[in-house]
C-alpha cells in the first residue's frame, strides 16, 4: 500500500511549516490517462535552512522550482515525495507535473458512461489523496487557502469548493476548451478540497441566502428527485444554524452524486460528493430514503465539525465521524419526517458497533493512529457508531442545552483551525459544570463492550425476593463502566406482550441491586436496557428467551421488540443460542415487524445465521423454513407496500430449494405475478443473481439482462453475476480478473463479492493458497482501497474449519504483515472462529431435538 505518512513525520512538518496558499492550475484536455497539474505553494518555515518534503504521486514531474532555484526532479522526486532542503523563512514552491487519472475511486477518478460515452471526473481525497491531483503538504493540520483554475472541455460543468468567478472563459487559440477559475477559499485542509467536472446534469435552488446545487450524470437525470434532496437540505440548514449558533461558513452548497464512489459520501467543503446509488433508478423502501437523508445531514454537519474546525491528526477521526453521525440522527428526529430515527440508529448503527467491538481488533474510541495505513482500517463501527452512541450518552449526562452551548463556543474559538479532543471536552465541562475526565477514561480510552444480565430469586408465589443487574466485561478488556439504564417487566396479555413496570437506575461495578423490583411478580419477559439508554449487550433469562422465541410478534411496541431481537442475535453470535432457534424466532416474528428498516435487518441476520452459524446439515431446512414464510408474506402483503418489497428481496436471499427457485424464475420471466410488486430493473438483477448462484441461470441470461440494462450499474451487476456462476471455469476467470488489478473500483468490488458467494465455499477452496501467496504483493503494490478490499473480501471466511485458522496463523507468523493488514487478517480469523463455535452450539441443539 503505497504512501504512508506517519504521525511523527506530520508533527515535525507542522512544527516547521505554516502554509499560506495553494494556487493550482489543471488542464483536463491533455488525454485520457493524464492531466497537467501545476501547483504554486507559498509557505513559511520557522527554522531557515531546514529540510522537509512535499507530497505528490504522479507519473511524471517536469520541473520543481524552490525560491527561484530549479531542483532536478530525478534527484528530489521518489514517486510519492519531493525532497526540499535549504528552506528560507518565506518560501515559494512551483511544481509542474503530469498527474494520472484514477480508476480506483481515489485521487481524481475518471469514469466513462457506457450509456452515452461521456466522461465524468471527481475527486476523493480522504484521507490523504489530494497529492494525486496537485502537489501539497497532505495532512489535516497544515490548512491553507486553496485557489483553482481549470482548463476543461466546453461541455463540462466544473465544481470546486468556492463558487467560480470565471465560467467557460475562452482559451486563446482553442475552440474545444474553456477556462474556469475558483477564487481562494478560507483556510481548509487538503483532504476536503475538491474538483468535480463533466457534463453533469444540475438542478439549482437557494435557501436562507445559500445557493444550492444538486448534480448527477446526464443519463441518470430522469431519476434525480432533486426536490426531495433540497427539502432535507433546507431542513438541515435551519436546524444546524439554530443549534450550532453559526451560519454555514462556505458560501454555496453543492451536492454531487458521482459514479463508482468508494464510500457513502465525502464532506468536501461546499462540494459534497455522494454515492450515486442514492439516485434511485428503481423502487426502494422508505428506509432507503431515510438512510439517504441521514447521509445528507451527516455530511452537512461536517461543514462545521470537520471542515470549519478540523482534528489535528487522525487520532480524533472518531470525534469527527461520531459527531456527524450523532448530529444527523438528532436532526432527523427533530427536524424531518423521520421522527423515529433513533430507533433506526439503535437497530442499525449500534448493531454495527457491537459487532465491531467484539472483534480482536477492537480499539478504544479514541484510537492510537501512528500512520496513514492505520487510518484506513479505522473507518469502522467503533469510529462511527460506538462513538455516536457514547456521544448520545454524553448529551444525556451533561444535558442537551449544555452540550450545544459547549459546541457553539468550540466553533467560535477554533474556526478555521485544528483541535484535539481535549478542546471540546473543556468547553463541555465549562458549559455543564461537570468533570468529564472519568467519563472520557471509561468510554473513550478503553475498548470492548459490557454485557448485562438479570439475576433474581422468587418466592412460592413467583414474586421477586431479590433482583440485581450483573455487569460483565470481556477478559481482554476488563473495564466495568458506569451505565444509566432501565429494566422493563413485560407480561403476556390479551393485548399482546406489554410493559407492566419500568425502573431506571445507575449501574456501577459487577453487581447492582434493584430493590424497587423486590415484591414484583415475575414477568414473562425481563428486559435489561429497556428504551436503549446505554451501549451494552443484553442477556435474556431462560423464561424471557422462551417468551421471545414463542411470541416476539406479540410485543406491542417496536423498540422493545427490536431490542429483544438484538439480544437474541447477540446470543446467537456468542453461541449462547442455537442458530436454528434464532431463525425460528425471525420466522415466527417477522410478520409482526412493521418497521421496514428493522425488518430488513432481521432478514439479513437470519440469512447470515444460516450461512455462518447453523449446522450445515440443518441449514437447507432453515432456508426452506424462512423462504416459505417470506413467500406467504409476499403474497399477503399490502400491494405496492414497502414491506412487500422487503419480503421480495428477503425471499430471493433465502430461496434454495427447487420449488422456491422456480418461483423466483417465474417472477423474473413474468410467468408469476404478485399484485402490487413491480419487478423493475434492480429487482430483476437481484432475482437473476440468486438464480445464477444456485445454477439455474448463466451467461446467456446475464448477457440478455445486460443488453436490457447497458448502464454502469448494469455492468456492475453483470460482473457480480458472472463471478457467481457455480463452475470452476467461472471462478478461474473471476480470479484472473481480480488479481490483474486493472478493473475500475466498482466492478472490482462487485466481482470479488460474486466470486466469494457464500454457497460456493468448495469452489473457492482452490484459491486459499493463491490468496495468501498474492496478499503481500497486493498490500505493497496496490492502492489502499483495492488492497483493503482484496484482503477483506477474498479472505476464505466461508471455509468454516480449523484449517482456515491454522493457515491464517501460519501466514502471520511467517510474514509479520504490516499492522493494518495484520488487523484485517485477525478480523477474518475471528469471523471463522466465531462461526465454528456457533455451528457446534447449533449441532448440539439439533442432537437434543432428535
Image (cartoon, rainbow, N blue to C red):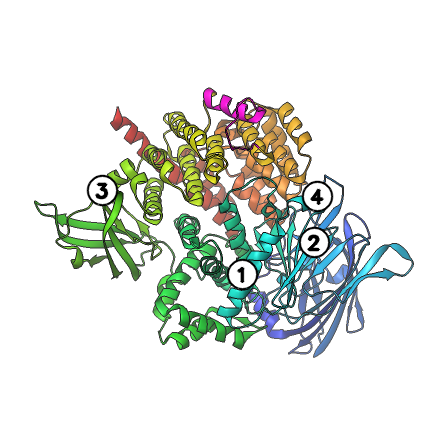
Q: Secondary structure at mark 1?
A: helix
Q: Which residue is mark 2?
A: 202
Q: Which mark is residue 620?
A: none
Q: Position of residue 71 (x, y in %)?
A: 78, 66
Q: Decide which of 747, 646 is in the foreground and name it.
A: 646
Q: Secondary structure at mark 2?
A: strand
In the image: residue 59, left or right of residue 391: right
Total labels: the figure holds 4
Question: Quick check: marks 1 and 2 in contact, CB under 8 Å?
Answer: no
- How many angstroms separate mark 3 from mark 1 (CA)? 42 Å
Q: Which residue is mark 3?
A: 493
Q: Decide which of 3, 495 is in the foreground and name it.
A: 495
Nearer to us of marks 2 and 3 is: 3
In the image: residue 528, left or right of residue 66: left
Q: Which residue is mark 1?
A: 235
Question: Quick check: marks 4 and 2 in contact, CB under 8 Å?
Answer: no
Q: Which mark is residue 219?
A: 4
**What is the crowding at mark 4: few (fewer than 14 residues within 10 Å), some, or many (at least 20)?**
some
Give the mark, 4 or 2, whose residue is nearer the N terminus.
2
Nearer to us of marks 4 and 1 is: 1
Q: Position of residue 269 (x, y in %)?
A: 62, 63
Give the mark, 4 or 3, whose residue is nearer the N terminus.
4
- How many angstroms separate mark 4 from mark 2 (CA)? 12 Å
Residue range corresponding to the magenta coloring: 659-679
Give the mark, 1 or 2, whose residue is nearer the N terminus.
2
Q: Is residue 202 above or below residue 398?
A: above
Q: Is residue 115 above or below residue 261?
A: above
- How many angstroms separate mark 1 from mark 2 (CA)? 21 Å
Residue at the right extreme?
A: 173
Q: Secondary structure at mark 3?
A: strand
Give the mark, 3 or 1, whose residue is nearer the N terminus.
1
Residue at x-position 44% and y-position 62%: 366
Amino acid at each position: 500500500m503505497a504512501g504512508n505518512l506517519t504521525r511523527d513525520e506530520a508533527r515535525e512538518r507542522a512544527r516547521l511549516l505554516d502554509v499560506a496558499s495553494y494556487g493550482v492550475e489543471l488542464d483536463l484536455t491533455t488525454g485520457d490517462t493524464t492531466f497537467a497539474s501545476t501547483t504554486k505553494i507559498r509557505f513559511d518555515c520557522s527554522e531557515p535552512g531546514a529540510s522537509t518534503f512535499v507530497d505528490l504521486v504522479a507519473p511524471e514531474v517536469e520541473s520543481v522550482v524552490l525560491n527561484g532555484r530549479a531542483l532536478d526532479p530525478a534527484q528530489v522526486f521518489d514517486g510519492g515525495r519531493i525532497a526540499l532542503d535549504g528552506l528560507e523563512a518565506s518560501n515559494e514552491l512551483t511544481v509542474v507535473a503530469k498527474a494520472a487519472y484514477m480508476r480506483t475511486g481515489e485521487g481524481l477518478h475518471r469514469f466513462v458512461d457506457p450509456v452515452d460515452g461521456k466522461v465524468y471526473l471527481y475527486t476523493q481525497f480522504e484521507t490523504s489523496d489530494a497529492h494525486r491531483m496537485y502537489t501539497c503538504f497532505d495532512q489535516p493540520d497544515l490548512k491553507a487557502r486553496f485557489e483553482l483554475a481549470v482548463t476543461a472541455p466546453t461541455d463540462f460543468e466544473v465544481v470546486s469548493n468556492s463558487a467560480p468567478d470565471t465560467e467557460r472563459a475562452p482559451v486563446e487559440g482553442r475552440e474545444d476548451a474553456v477556462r474556469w477559475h475558483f477564487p481562494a477559499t478560507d483556510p481548509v485542509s487538503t483532504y476536503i478540497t475538491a474538483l468535480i467536472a463533466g457534463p453533469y446534469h444540475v438542478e439549482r435552488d437557494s435557501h436562507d441566502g445559500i445557493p444550492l446545487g444538486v448534480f448527477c450524470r446526464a443519463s441518470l437525470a430522469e431519476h434525480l428527485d432533486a426536490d426531495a434532496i433540497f427539502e432535507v437540505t433546507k431542513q438541515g440548514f435551519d436546524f444546524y444554524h439554530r443549534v450550532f449558533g453559526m451560519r454555514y461558513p462556505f458560501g454555496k452548497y453543492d451536492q454531487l452524486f458521482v459514479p463508482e464512489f468508494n464510500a457513502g459520501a465525502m464532506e468536501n467543503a461546499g462540494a459534497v460528493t455522494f454515492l450515486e446509488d442514492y439516485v434511485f433508478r428503481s423502487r426502494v423502501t422508505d428506509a432507503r430514503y431515510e438512510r439517504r437523508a441521514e447521509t445528507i445531514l451527516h455530511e452537512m454537519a461536517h461543514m462545521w465539525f470537520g471542515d470549519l474546525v478540523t482534528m489535528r491528526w487522525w487520532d480524533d477521526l472518531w470525534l469527527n465521524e461520531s459527531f456527524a453521525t450523532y448530529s444527523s440522527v438528532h436532526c432527523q428526529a427533530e427536524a424531518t419526517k423521520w421522527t423515529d430515527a433513533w430507533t433506526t440508529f439503535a437497530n442499525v448503527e449500534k448493531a454495527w458497533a457491537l459487532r465491531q467491538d467484539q472483534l480482536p481488533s477492537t480499539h478504544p474510541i479514541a484510537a492510537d493512529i501512528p500512520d496513514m495505513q492505520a487510518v484506513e482500517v479505522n473507518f469502522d463501527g467503533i469510529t462511527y457508531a460506538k462513538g455516536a452512541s457514547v456521544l448520545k450518552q454524553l448529551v444525556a449526562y451533561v444535558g442537551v442545552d449544555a452540550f450545544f452551548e459547549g459546541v457553539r463556543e468550540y466553533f467560535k474559538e477554533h474556526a478555521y483551525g485544528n483541535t484535539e479532543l481535549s478542546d471540546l471536552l473543556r468547553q463541555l465541562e465549562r458549559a455543564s459544570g461537570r468533570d468529564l475526565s472519568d467519563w472520557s477514561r471509561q468510554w473513550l480510552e478503553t475498548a470492548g463492550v459490557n454485557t448485562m444480565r438479570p439475576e433474581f430469586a422468587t418466592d412460592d408465589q413467583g414474586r421477586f425476593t431479590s433482583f440485581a443487574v450483573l455487569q460483565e466485561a470481556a477478559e481482554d478488556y476488563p473495564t466495568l463502566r458506569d451505565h444509566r439504564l432501565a429494566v422493563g417487566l413485560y407480561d403476556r396479555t390479551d393485548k399482546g406482550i406489554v410493559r407492566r413496570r419500568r425502573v431506571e437506575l445507575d449501574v456501577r461495578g459487577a453487581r447492582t441491586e434493584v430493590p424497587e423490583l423486590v415484591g414484583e411478580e415475575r414477568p414473562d419477559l425481563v428486559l435489561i436496557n429497556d428504551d436503549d439508554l446505554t451501549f451494552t449487550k443484553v442477556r435474556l433469562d431462560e423464561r424471557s428467551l422462551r417468551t421471545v422465541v414463542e411470541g416476539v410478534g406479540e410485543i406491542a411496541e417496536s423498540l422493545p421488540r427490536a431490542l429483544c431481537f438484538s439480544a437474541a442475535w447477540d446470543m446467537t453470535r456468542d453461541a449462547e443460542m442455537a442458530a436454528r432457534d434464532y431463525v425460528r424466532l425471525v420466522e415466527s416474528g417477522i410478520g409482526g415487524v412493521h418497521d421496514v428498516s428493522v425488518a430488513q435487518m432481521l432478514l439479513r441476520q437470519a440469512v447470515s445465521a444460516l450461512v455462518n452459524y447453523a449446522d450445515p446439515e440443518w441449514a437447507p431446512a432453515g432456508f426452506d423454513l424462512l423462504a416459505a414464510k417470506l413467500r406467504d408474506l409476499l403474497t399477503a402483503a399490502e400491494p405496492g407496500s414497502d414491506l412487500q418489497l422487503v419480503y421480495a428481496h428477503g425471499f430471493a436471499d433465502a430461496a434454495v430449494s427447487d420449488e422456491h427457485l422456480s418461483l423466483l424464475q417465474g417472477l423474473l420471466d413474468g410467468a408469476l405475478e404478485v399484485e402490487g410488486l413491480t419487478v423493475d430493473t434492480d429487482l430483476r438483477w437481484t432475482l437473476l443473481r440468486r438464480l445464477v448462484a444456485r445454477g439455474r441461470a448463466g451467461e446467456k441470461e446475464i448477457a440478455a439482462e445486460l443488453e436490457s440494462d447497458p448502464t454502469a450499474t448494469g455492468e456492475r451487476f453483470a460482473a457480480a453475476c458472472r463471478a457467481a456462476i457455480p463452475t470452476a471455469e467461472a471462478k478461474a476467470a473471476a480470479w484472473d480478473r481480480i488479481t490483474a488489478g486493472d478493473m475500475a473500483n466498482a466492478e472490482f468490488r462487485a466481482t470479488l463479492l460474486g466470486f466469494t458467494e457464500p454457497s460456493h465455499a468448495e469452489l473457492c477452496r482452490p484459491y486459499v493458497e493463491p490468496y495468501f501467496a498474492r496478499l503481500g504483493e497486493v498490500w505493497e503494490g496496490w492502492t489502499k482501497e483495492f488492497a483493503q478490499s482484496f484482503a477483506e473480501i477474498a479472505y476464505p471466511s466461508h471455509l468454516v474449519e480449523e484449517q482456515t485458522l491454522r493457515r491464517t496463523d501460519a501466514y502471520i507468523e511467517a510474514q509479520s504483515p504490516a499492522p493494518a493488514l495484520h488487523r484485517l487478517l485477525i478480523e477474518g480469523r475471528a469471523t471463522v472462529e466465531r462461526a465454528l463455535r456457533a455451528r457446534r452450539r447449533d449441532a448440539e441443539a439439533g442432537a437434543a431435538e432428535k
